[in-house]
């Protein structure tokens, strides 16, 4: 059975849909969890829901502060064993309409921030001779998607970056893997027109949307001792969507 007792765990984007499920999963499995986000009210709600969690408001786009942030997280948790890079952003537009700053902002937050969070976490993990990093990507990083050139590029970049980091630090007992969700139930997806939702589910072999728990189960496995010999891999959580979709893909 997976158990994270005495493990110090950082989860970014903890107050979002998938982030909430990640927090729930790792706390249920005994982890000492610190969750971050940018919305104070949501972080307060998270603290009320899970009294044992530590929360810290932090904007991962502030690259110059990430090293200090990881240092503070390490001190507050008393170490750093597991990092789940879940925070991200999308600004969608057709490529010819996409502004330079919209391209840069998504790449900076999704890819550069994930790299820097991983880099400074690895420094701590090397000292402990143990570490697990799981980066949340997206199916569109593998398939591409209309109106998401910036988002798809950032998520594809995370996959390549994670493979390289995995090779560099494999002998240090540090694993770096990715989980790539497909179409997951969230507050946002619940607002999609029923006709669009039916079309999307018809293109998924399992015929249904995924849940945040489907994602968190996979992340927990990769962060556990059961996955100690797995590194540089991406596990797809999409009900078979990635292997079957050949045409236009719409993700919200």
Image (spheres, helix red, strand yellow):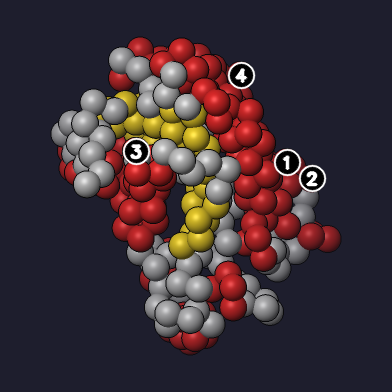
| Mark sitting earlier along the chain (3/1) | 1
Residue at image mark 1? 104
Residue at image mark 2? 100
Query: Can the viewer see residue 45?
Result: no
Q: Within the image, what quadrant is residue 49 found in?
A: top left
Judge the density around disc 3: few (<14), some (14-19), many (≥20) Cα neighbours within 10 Å: some
Q: Nearer the viewer, mark 4 or mark 3?
A: 3
Judge the density around disc 4: few (<14), some (14-19), many (≥20) Cα neighbours within 10 Å: few
Q: Position of residue 29 (x, y in %)?
A: 22, 42
Q: Nearer the viewer, mark 2 or mark 4?
A: 4
Residue at disc 1, secondary structure: helix
User: Which residue is located at x 58 percent, y 61 percent?
Assistant: 139
| CA distance separating discs 2 and 4 | 21 Å
From the viewer's perspective, is residue 203 above or below residue 42?
below
Badges 1 and 4: C-beta atoms under 8 Å apart? no
Instruction: Tell me the tag on residue 64.
Output: 4
Residue at image mark 3? 225
């Amino acid at each position: 059975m997976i158990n994270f007792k005495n493990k110090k765990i950082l989860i970014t984007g903890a107050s979002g849909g998938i982030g909430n499920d990640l927090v729930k999963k790792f706390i249920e499995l005994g982890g000492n969890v610190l969750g971050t986000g940018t919305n104070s009210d949501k972080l307060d709600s998270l603290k009320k829901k899970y009294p044992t969690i530590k929360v810290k408001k932090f904007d991962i786009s502030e690259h110059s502060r990430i090293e200090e942030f990881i240092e503070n997280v390490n001190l507050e948790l008393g170490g750093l064993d597991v990092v789940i890079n879940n925070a991200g952003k999308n600004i969608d537009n057709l490529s010819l309409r996409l502004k330079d700053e919209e391209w840069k902002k998504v790449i900076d937050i999704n890819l550069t921030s994930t790299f820097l969070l991983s880099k400074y976490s690895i420094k701590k993990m090397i000292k402990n001779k143990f570490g697990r990093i799981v980066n949340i990507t997206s199916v569109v990083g593998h398939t591409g998607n209309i109106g998401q050139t910036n988002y798809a590029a950032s998520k594809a970049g995370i996959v390549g970056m994670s493979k390289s980091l995995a090779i560099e630090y494999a002998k240090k007992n540090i694993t770096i893997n990715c989980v790539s969700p497909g179409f997951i139930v969230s507050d946002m997806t619940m607002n999609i027109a029923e006709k669009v939702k039916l079309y999307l589910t018809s293109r998924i072999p399992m015929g249904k949307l995924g849940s945040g728990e489907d994602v968190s189960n996979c992340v927990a496995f990769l962060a556990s001792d059961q996955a100690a010999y797995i590194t540089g891999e991406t596990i797809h959580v999409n009900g078979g969507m990635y292997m079957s979709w050949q045409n236009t893909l719409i993700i919200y």
